[in-house]
Amino acid sequence: MMKKYLLSILCTILLLSGCNYLDMVPEKDIETIESIFEQKTKVEQWWKALYSDLNILFASFKTNNAYTGADEFVTCQALYNAAPHLALDGLKVANGQQMSQDPYGTIWNQMYIVIRRCNILLENIDKTYNISEEDREWWQADTKVLKAFIYFELIRHYGPICLVPQNMPVDLDVKHYQLPRQPVDTCFKEVIRLLDEAKDHIPTYNQRSEVYGHTFCLEALYALKAKVLLYAASPLFNGNAFYSDFKNKNGEPLFSATYDRNKWLLAAEAADKAAEICAEGGRSLYSGQTSKKTKLLNTMSDIEASVYSRFNNQEFLLEWKYPDQFYMYILPRLIGDPVNYESSAMGCLSPSMKMVEMYYTVNGLPIESDMTWNYSNRYKLGFESSRAYEDVVALNSSIVNLHLAREPRFYACIAGDRMYWQRGTNTGNVDFNLLVEAHKDEEPWGTQADFLVSNDWQNINGYWLKKHLFSWLPTQNYASGLQNESAPIIRLAEVYLMQAEAWNEYLEQPDNRVYDPLDKVRERAGILPVREAWRTYSNNPAKVDSKVGMRDIIHQEYNIEFAFEGHRYWNIRRWLKAQQVMNEKQYGWNILGTSAQTFYNNEEGPIVVWSKNKFVAPRDYFDPFNAEEILISGMVQNPGW
């Protein structure tokens, strides 16, 4: 009977991957499920395995397209041509190469397998005899939150999805396993229902043993709920005309064509509640915990630490271990430097010029909006003499104005020509605060090649990414200093920006409910409060007083605070901006220039380094299903595919 029951569970996967999945389940596993759920230790292993599956998909820079599938990076042709074990498929998605025959970054099959496993746990844990009622309720609740998380990720990828509230019996006609996609509002409601069901039995961060640091705490649950409601309110899902005629095969509309302003209120109230729960749990932004010699260096150190954790950062609400070696793509090789050279480093995945220019000025304003910052001369050479920038940029030297008088997040996250980068802990004999000298033949940073090549790792725009690399670890043998570092899946700063965005969209005119949470993020970033910055230093002081103006400001704050963390990929989609920003050319400096003049293109501005980015709307707003699976499942394909 148990064997028949478990076979029925597997049949729910019919709509997902045909019969191939059955070949992956050994007969003995089917026969031992009943005994597995008799004992707590085996049930706990099952529960942990659910997280392992998600960790591999969503904390990985290789398998999660969101990290490299936007316009935040540029790279050399060699990485596009790399062998599968080195390939970053997100780059191909950014180039418009997504396909329905074999989609890049697909999660559909894997996630429904995990949903099946979640359902198995929920349906069988009551049979476990040696578990306390408290743990039973916790593990059940946590599994519901995991299921909600999976549904949410599926919605982000595919829009309307199939809901599987429980595993299905085996003795149904095949047509019953071909589940239809549900209207997207129904999908969002199911995610919220699961989270609400679970919340009373999820511990806070401080109530939970550190060995369960990868699981959902109460703060993460409330943050996820706010995020789900924020997406439901966003333009992609809320009255999107692109999908007004997107229907199931029976004619059922999958998107509402009517905009609902009240969805923003639900998101705003949920974000407020999440912030309240985080405050009660003692969560805070990482700040004020370093003692460098200048204010700027201290702030930069706080910013760097805000994305560093070994399951012990109060700012991380949900964190999973990095499952791959992303550092080797961005770590500089430093060929010719015997102290710092690292053979495993590629150093070829660079922050784009678009992101370099995205960061604010020292006054906390966009570079084109600060009347004290010379935007028209940003590509010309200047110099810095203030000791406030000691060990950050080369003082009293020729340096491009674009690198001067910028906000601390710029200096904490971006390394460019004549900027310093701390690449290890200083000793009495070695100063690891390295000056980046990026002109051709300036070892170890500048290229030694006479032309752009397609068969070697090459930094093609003259910038390196500091974020995700830790300054106290030297470049040479960098991996030896890594232990159990985690990727931030949800940070507290996101809760504050969700508050600001949702209230701004709901209110007719912004008030403190918009400004105050935004200013919490800006304060840690070392920049002025938003109203003070705009009213004092901007060329458009009234922008901060309007809903439309604050929308632009909040969007840019997201782009900066969460740059290179996989957020921009999703944000430009839910804001319906992707078709505008993803079809632009990518720029950089002339890395073959041997002098400041030639490197900076005779001060005439950056040159095109990549022109293949492509986004087709509305097709590329959602991932395609594998064409074969559409035939198997009977579902409707996403528009445009």
Image: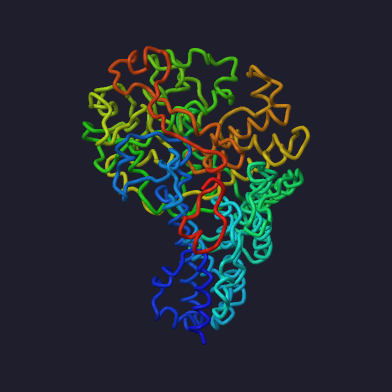
Comparing 196 with 362, the one in front is 196
Residue 413 rendering spot, x and y as whole percentages:
45, 34
The residue sitting at 39% across, 72% down in the picture is 23
Residue 83 appears in the rendering: yes
Rendered position, 232 above or below 410? below
The residue sitting at 48% across, 71% down in the picture is 46
Residue 48 rendering spot, x and y as whole percentages:
48, 66
Rendered position, 226 above or below 330? below
Residue 240 rendering spot, x and y as whole percentages:
67, 43
Q: Tell me: 355 left or right of 165.
A: left
Q: Quadrant of residue 523?
A: top right
Rendered position, 610 above or below 215? above
Q: Tell me: 220 left or right of 383.
A: right
Residue furthest out toward the right: 508
Q: Tell me: 515 left or right of 625.
A: right
Comparing 627 with 554, the one in front is 627
The residue sitting at 50% across, 79% down in the picture is 6
Residue 429 appears in the rendering: no
Residue 462 rendering spot, x and y as whole percentages:
36, 27
